[in-house]
Amino acid sequence: MKQSMALFLLCAVAAMAADLAGKWSGSFKAEGADHDIPQLVILKQHGSTLSGSAGPDASEQYPLENGRVDGNNVSFQVTTGEWKFSYNLTVEKDSLSGNLKLESTAQVRNAKVTLTRVKGQ
Amino acid sequence: MRKLILNIHLAIGIVAGVFVTLLGVTGGILAFEPELDRISHRDISYVKPGGRALSLAEIGNAISQKYPGEGIVAYLPSTNPGFPTRVILSRGIVSINQYTGDVLGVRTRGQSFLGTVRVLHVRLAMGNPGPFILKWSSLATVVSLLSGLYLWWPVKRMRIAGRWWSARFWYDLHSAIGFYSLLPALVLAGTGTVIGFEDHVSRLFDYISPQRPIENDLVLPVAKLEEAPLIGPDQAVAIASAQLPGGVPYRVQMPRYGGLYVVALEYLQRRVAGERNLISLDPATGKVISAHFSSDLSFRVRLLAANGAIHDGSIWGTPSRIVAAIASMLLPLQATSGLLIWLRRKGILHTR
């Protein structure tokens, strides 16, 4: 009985966790930069694991790495070339917002990023 | 008139002197950034040339054996026989001996000393106020150099006659350095100002010579990330090289990262400022999706690239980089000697 209850609670918590699958768009501006960089993130969710891709638009996408969902916290990374993008976001209704760290072998830059769910996917 | 010019010269020195000093020191270091970077990572930056260089596929296999399961983001083939080929992975940039297949090591991501020097030079290592302060400091340097020339003209002092630490010494030093470094310093400050005000300058160029920037023409097809590429990186390079005979590949972006093979090539013998030849290929068929060559670049892009190459001294190779580094390093000396002259005249500092 206790095991069934625990399983039920586990399923309930999983069901309550936001379904992040889908397309999310937004932009970021790194500190000291003078331009906004567009973002399109395509998420696939398998429990607490995220996969999918991200990039500036639909035609240029890079695979998601180390995608995790922990409650309202979402994290994933994208390597585009010399730069690696590490997202640490919080889910709020139909938006994901938080910090983005950009790292090359010489520099580390930070940015604030907000993504909103693309309607009518 | 002379008094007004002197006051402008002094005001700029006092207000912008510290930033000019910073720009000079960091600029002098950055003139030799590639060499300094290689020296600071010498164990993974050099190879002994010899024998046949491995193909990209063979290099990819060696990387996969060393780091199983890690996707290759891009190859950075060596364009110098003494430098290793590098491969970009998620964990960092791996150097590999292209003659033996030995993995030399990994450059992990993070803030480096030279990276810090660069962010100080371009944005004072801070957010939006940094670039704003620096671009106006560059412009102020141009005004300071021209006003300095006006002040120097009647005396025309070109050598140091005063005793060490005497008032005359600092005045002579300031005048002599100002004279001998005027032209390269003006070029550095002028090109730096253009970089700082690049958005405004771009708008001006687009007004004078209306031409759509080439990067806006690039339309890529939807990525097929789930599909394995049917052609290998060596085939991609062969197809791309046929588009630019004599061009040497220096970057091959893999299709899983961006949706297409993107091969960047350059001419080693006749490098031009801002050279950028990019060939994009469908990974399944090898069909050329887009081919953009340096010769297609707009007047604005070419001019701004040339401006950047003049500013960092790369325009004419090592000789121009040496001139840029020396002129850059003399700027702090000018700011310091100018400050000492002013402090002495104000009676704050006593010299011999």
Image (cartoon, grey):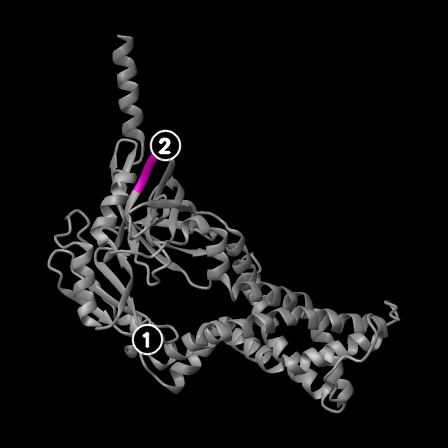
Asked which secondary structure carries label 2, the reply is strand
- Distance between the alpha carbons at the discs numbered 1 and 2: 44 Å
Q: Disc 1 is attached to a residue of which chain?
A: B
Q: Which residues are magenta?
A: A65-71
**Are the residues flagged by discs 1 and 2 in contact, CB closer than 8 Å?**
no
Asked if residue A17 shows in the view, the reply is: yes
Is the residue B240 above or below the residue B3 in the image? above
The percent coordinates of residue A98 (x first, y second) are 43, 45
x then y, percent, for residue B76: 31, 57
The residue positioned 22% from the left and 49% from the top of the image is B58
Give the residue at mark 1. B213
In the depicted structure, whether residue B257 falls above or below residue A91: below
For residue A22, what is the image quadrant?
top left
Front-most of A113 and B153? B153
Q: Quadrant of the N terminus of chain B?
A: bottom right
Amino acid type, residue under disc 2 in the picture: Asp
Report the residue marked by disc 2: A70
Principal SS element in the magenta part? strand
Residue toward you, B97 or B91: B97
Q: Quadrant of residue B8?
A: bottom right
